[in-house]
Image: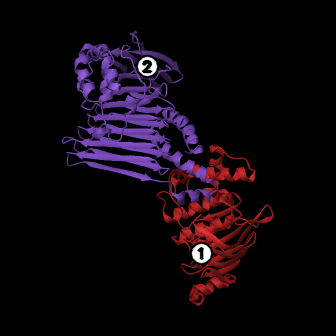
Amino acid sequence: MFKEKLLEQISFLPASVSSDGANFFRQNLPTKKDESWKYTDLSFLNTEPLAIDLQKTYLHFDISEAAQEVIVKIKLGNKATLPTTQGFSVMEGGSLRQKLKDDGVSLTLLNKTWQEQNYFSRLSESTVTSDVYILFDQQWSTEKIFQLQWQGSTAALAQFGSMRVSLVVADGVSVQLHETFNGNANSFLNTTTDLYIGANASVHLLKSQPQQSPRTTITTRVRLGQASQFYMVSFISENMWSRHNTYVDLSGREAHADLKASFLCREKEFVDHHTYIDHSVGYTTSRQDYAGVLDGRGEGVFNGKVHIRRDAQKSDAEQLSRNLLLSKNAVANAKPELLIDADDVKAKHGATIGQLDQEEIFYMQSRGLTAQQARALVIKSFVFSAADHLPNALAQKFYALAAPAVQNFTEKPS
Amino acid sequence: MLKVNNLHVSVNDKPVLKGLNLEVKAGEVHAIMGPNGSGKSTLSKVIAGHPAYKVTEGTMEYDINFKMTNILEMSPDERAREGIFLAFQYPVEIPGVTNFEFLKASYNALAKQQGFPTMDDEKFATFVKKKLEIVKLNESFLHRAVNSGFSGGEKKKNEIVQMAVMSPRLCFLDETDSGLDIDALKVVADGINRLRSPNNAFVLVTHYQRLLDYVKPDIVHVLSGGRIVKSGGKELALELEKQGYEAYI
């Protein structure tokens, strides 16, 4: 039904995507038979009433400033003037390329096409008429947090909304990002964020999904230039259904990517992380640590692949999936994978799935904590470990989100 | 302060303690010695309220608000908040929870129960630093995960720090001397001596008498076959050191 509804409106898509797109979207809606969707149940797309409106295909930006923070709300709407302010500019692809060319900046990162995509990232690319970029230049204050708030439907009727934006971080610039996903819990929000991180630049990205936020498919694609750094922390608390696809292209020598996530999941909630880290050149490093706490009938997935290509000698990759199961009905699916074509590399992966250790709980109880306080402390430490590499301001945001979420989770067990 | 009468305890349906009697008064230091498998660790665990140790017979009374109260039905945390402390033979590692956070949570849990004001991070940092000095641990220990990656000696010292933070009335130390080199043993013993007072009592559970060279016991008990088979003064420990436990098995 979802597919049919989508195809009914395919004519609203730009001509460049409508003919190919119709075929693609008709043939490729994933099912559990697809290896990378085997744990992901998309059946609600066909069983629940979900309105699709592809006529509003422009991104609408609402920008406000608070102390040390720029808040950018993005929603679907009608065509509007793209804003520019000190430190960053929102512009269409053509203008951006021209500007970078005029400034003598290499377009290598931008010109390489994305090898990794999925049905939903393709949809979010296709339904946006203009390709929109946010450029962070040398004037951007490293102390500020750029808060990107994706706004899904707030209408009473459940809606499907699909958006994409690209962020370009100029050489040597450091950016702190906080990305949030908002809207009605019964809606479905599909976003793609493409990040191009210039040489010697760095990005710290905190992604958070508040409770009762829409079902989401969130794609983050990151391409890193020479000696650049990318740190990402995802925090998901009691979200009904979310699928996170993260693709990292370490295309500059000595680039480093560090992905962490913590999530709390219970009842029939579902959190699905898929990552693909592509070490395409040498001396690149990557770290992944995904930590899930699952109670009730909650289900978590980590399916991560690290690919070290033939020319990526001296690369170093680690990936870890950690899961704490609090009930016999909770499920953790962990599938870390390494694909190594080079011979002089370091790589390791691991997965742990366990329950709360009763000796740990007794030890804490013997120090005066109640069993519930002991349990909460272990869960809190499990969740908070994700914020280890965040700069202070972003870490504080993480703690402000995670502390009440952990409290709620531990005080009201399933 | 503590009165254990005819205590029978089973672990996995296997009887381990078989009619143990023990009385500890405020201000006393007791040593419980005995061969492997005699029930020493079981006694420590059952005092702290470990759920795997089932009391099948007997009583265990402890002074709460000047009244001897049956504590068998109390949970481990209730006992701890009433001032019963067990220093573990094998302190448990808790990855991800910092020592600072753990100690503060522990202190505040007790403070609430006992009617003292709780402490915020700043106040507690000042308070706990003095406790670290007792066993010569530096501040970096506060920011490490509880016992994770600690050496054997550091773990045992950390137990003493926890004891100092909690100021318990009844302290059971289960083989706190095992795994310590002579310098660490002296530091730990000195820490125990500094925490002794007329208001609290210590029970040192040990195989060897060397800890007792540094912490002088008032009463020494021999535990064998799940019962206390002999009690005496310090000289009993020296006798055991010379003659072994054979006479008591």
Q: Position of residue A94 (x, y in %)?
A: 28, 14
**Chain identifier matching the red colour in the rendered picture:** B
C-alpha distance separating marks 2 and 1: 66 Å
- Side of B161 relative to A204 (left or right): right
Tell me which corner region of the image, top left, top right, bottom left or bottom right, holds residue A278.
top left
Which colour denotes chain A? Answer: purple
Residues at circles 2 and 1 in contact by the CB criterion of under 8 Å = no
Residue B54 x, y percent position in the rendering = 61, 69
Q: Which residue is drawn at 41% across and 33% down?
A: A204
Q: In which quarter of the image is the C terminus of chain A?
A: top right
Q: Name the residue under label 1.
A: B40
Q: How is the image coloured?
A: by chain
Q: Nearer the viewer, residue A186 or B190?
A: A186
The three-letter code of the residue at mark 1 reads: Lys
Q: Name the residue under label 2.
A: A74
Q: Looking at the rendered structure, which numbered label has been put on residue A22? A: none
Residue at 59% x, 80% y is B34
